[in-house]
Image: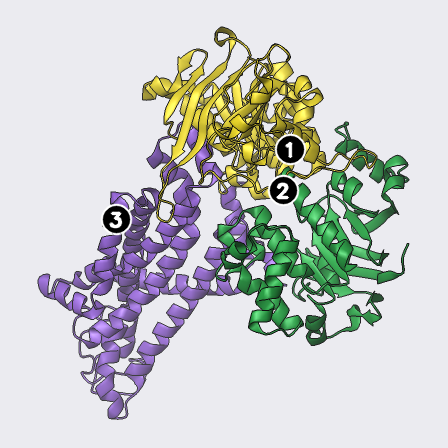
Chain colours: A green, B yellow, C purple
Amino acid sequence: MNAPVLVVRDLTVSVLQDRQPRAVVDGISFDLAEGEILALVGESGCGKTKTAEALLGLVPASAGSVSAQSIVLGGTNLAALPESAMRRVRGRDISMVFQEPLTALDPVFRTGHQLSAVFRRHRRLGRSEARRASLEMLERVGFADAGHVLRSYPHELSGGMRQRVVIAMAMACRPRVLVADEPTTALDVTTQAQVLTRLTELAGEAGTAILLITHDLGIVAHYCDRALIMRDGRIVEQAAVDQLFRQPRHPYTARLLAAARGEAP
Amino acid sequence: MAGMATSLLSVRDLVVRYPGRGRRPGEIVAVRGVNIDIAPATILAVVGESGSGKTSLARAILQLQPIASGRVLLSGEDLAALSPQQLRAARRDIQAVFQDPMASLSPRRSVLQSLIEPLDHFRIGAAGEREDRAVAALETVGLDPALRYRLPHELSGGQRQRVALARALVSGPRLIIADEPLSSLDVPSQVRIVDLLLELRDRLGVAFLFVSHDLSVVRRLADAVAVMYLGTVVETAPAQALFAAAAHPYTRALLAASPAPDPRLPRPLVLPGEPPSALTPTAGCVFHKRCSERLARCAAEEPAQSNPGSLEPHHSVRCFLWKA
Amino acid sequence: MEPEGRIWRRLREDRAGLAGLAVVSLFLMLALAVWLGLIGQDWSIAAGGRWEPPSPQHWFGTNILGQDIFQRAVYSVRTAFEVGLVVAVLSTLLGALLGALAGWYSHGWPDGAILWLMGVLDSIPFYLFVAAVAYALQGQPWAMHVAMIATFWTGTSRLVRAEVMKLKTREFVMAARTIGLPDLLILGRHVLPNTVHILLVQASIAFVAAIKTEVILSFLGLGVQDGVSWGLMLAESTQEVLAGHFNNFLAASLMLFVLLMSFNLLADALQDAFDPTFDPKQAAQ
């Protein structure tokens, strides 16, 4: 395993439920190695999405409180950063791809405009340079007619196309870490194969590590190096993928595998 | 394919069109001449991706969507030719469960109210005993009758979908059209509902038309499978035959793209090209543009549905590679 | 627990709403008492001298004509409720009905016709319209009610139309059609009840707007004809205030403010209580 690019220690997110604080993420710790694809697996409600949001500092105070001993990304502790500093980090060093391609893009702006905005903000490129960079990025996510996509509005594109645009935006600055929260759940299976293949290729070229959040063990089996199994806010098992499928150590993992294979839970 | 005489549901040459509107002046043909048969107490899965027309097909069968041409025969009777009263009576026999149980249950009606509504409408049983029938339906789907006063948002996703199923069952239908009923549920809930559907088929003799894009579920559930692409059924087969030896290149691509939960198996293959758009009609075979095995004639002519000798008896495919 | 009990329980947990409810109920009882002839009947007689200060006989004093301000203020409660309720209920119902039809048959001719009507009514300056209606109805006491109902309904209608257009594509409507229920039944039983939160808000806006509009109309002489209202009192008081006498003004404005404020609090609480997905405990954090 390479040197870790992201080190998370004791991350907790608690929300108020019935006026009592409840830890939806309960003191988890893990490392993400450079260039690795790490799966974060669990059923709905296990806290995986909140974990992702907490890493990017996207949990508003009204939704819950986040505390961590450390979230170290390449030497900087994200947990200790004020929002203004976090804004610089987001998109450039760590970025996120969300589940719902329909709402991830602003419907009133063309995709080219939105993609260029990333380049102009973080890489300080001028308008035409940003446009060139956007075109190139769209080609790299597999669009045959990148110019057409650049000029299109989000609603003119299919779900898979939108998701690839979002990936282009997330990877534009070659971040060190990409957090992908169920990026293909809303897509067809053939589109899913296309999107995940492109995503892992791009990440490989750029040296980006991916934290891939999913409930689909098939995706874990074929696209990920290691996996974290999460349940009720805690990590119950961590293992390399081969090991996990061959010999799961925790009974919960075994249950998930059985359900995925269609056996009665 | 089961003969028409024994079929519970027969769809013949069904065409569904949506008129163009505003910026899309051309009309969209969502379903182009589909033929399917469902035998009593069997589960037919209709599989396809977005743009395949499977949802339009389901709605047209339910008479919720106008049919441009073709016939839908329930036990030999053409549903479109029925009078409103006859259609109303026929609806008892063919019910539906939809994808999003939160959206398919009326948000302000309790479970009991939602279950009693079809009973009242079809005038099933004496008014006093309808609540008992509703409770019986709840028990059939494995829910505690104490839940009957709850509102939809007070139930979990799996519970809501069971209520939707109970509502579909309460009028005693012989066929239930299920349009992606598992898509909004998590995997363990999906497994339980699949078991429930199988039990309903075996115990109550209910047939299902199960529309889905999820092949792993279909593998466990279906007796027969019809694969759709861009409004056309490209292949129909008994489930085992389809998964063991798929004939159509699209079916094979679909199976190859699905990631199985086993890292030792080969990685999913990517099907090149963009998903189909019904806005730009294609000449020839609907799939030829993305087909890795296409022949010259595939771009010019559309293949007919055939059951070549090299395949099993009920296994039909629309592909020039399999000309009988 | 039955759905109705649920709404009541929610309401009980909202303090501001309860306060609003209490005050509005109090005012409502005053209005009923006036209507039944129990109090506030002496609003028109000149019971005392001009501009008398508050006294045991005249709690708020008297106005320029020697009429008891308190009596007039209390009678105005009845006027306010009458105008407010009639306009609120009828304009909201009318708007709901037309909006639902327009939304259900959207892009068809009923929709086109109703939208056209809405456009026409919204283009006419309100006070011109009211004056025209008042003139046409030649001083009938309900001229202003008709004018208000005829213009207030468009706002509700527009909102209901949009909501119905959204709801009719929802799967529960499809489920109802699968059973074979007729369209209008689906509209009435499944769709419209899901617009109740909109209707409540619109009704409360209309109630408040009606009362405030009446004030302005009274200034223009087009308001209440056969009684007294706060609007009329305020109109009278403009002259009095210049002469340094504020009792009339204060009485009317204070009562007006308290009623409208309480009503708004109650309406907010009601809207939350009716929303099936709203969790009051979660919102309180």
Same-chain status of marks 2 and 3: no
Task: Answer yes or no: is residue B142 visible.
Answer: yes
Quarter-wise, where is residue B237 in the image? top right
Task: Determine the secondary structure under disc 1.
Answer: loop
- The dot on residue A191 is 2
Instruction: Name the residue nearer the viewer: A106 or B136.
Output: A106
Q: Residue B106's spot in the image, x, y percent?
A: 49, 39
* Mark 1 or mark 2, whichever is nearer to me: 2
Q: Residue furthest bottom?
A: C243
Q: Amino acid at mark 1?
A: Asp
* Mark 1 or mark 3, whichever is nearer to me: 1
Chain letter for the residue marked with disc 3 in the picture: C
Quarter-wise, where is residue C89 in the image? bottom left
- The dot on residue A97 is none
Q: Which residue lies under the disc numbered 1?
A: B214
Q: Amino acid at mark 2?
A: Thr
Q: Is residue C72 above or below residue C165?
A: below
Q: Residue C88's spot in the image, x, y percent?
A: 31, 58
Q: Which residue lies under the disc numbered 3?
A: C112
Mark 1 burial class by Cα count in 10 Å: few <14, some 14-19, many 20+: some
- Give the alpha-carbon distance from disc 1 to disc 2, as whole Å: 13 Å
Q: Is residue B199 above or below residue C240?
A: above
Q: Residue A130's spot in the image, x, y percent?
A: 60, 68
Mark 3 burial class by Cα count in 10 Å: few <14, some 14-19, many 20+: some
Chain letter for the residue marked with disc 1 in the picture: B
Same-chain status of marks 1 and 2: no
- Give the alpha-carbon distance from disc 2 to disc 3, as whole Å: 41 Å
Residue at the (40%, 13%) spot, across then down: B77
Q: Indicate the quadrant containing the N terminus of chain B: top left, top right, bottom left or bottom right.
A: top right
- Give the alpha-carbon distance from disc 1 to disc 3, as whole Å: 42 Å
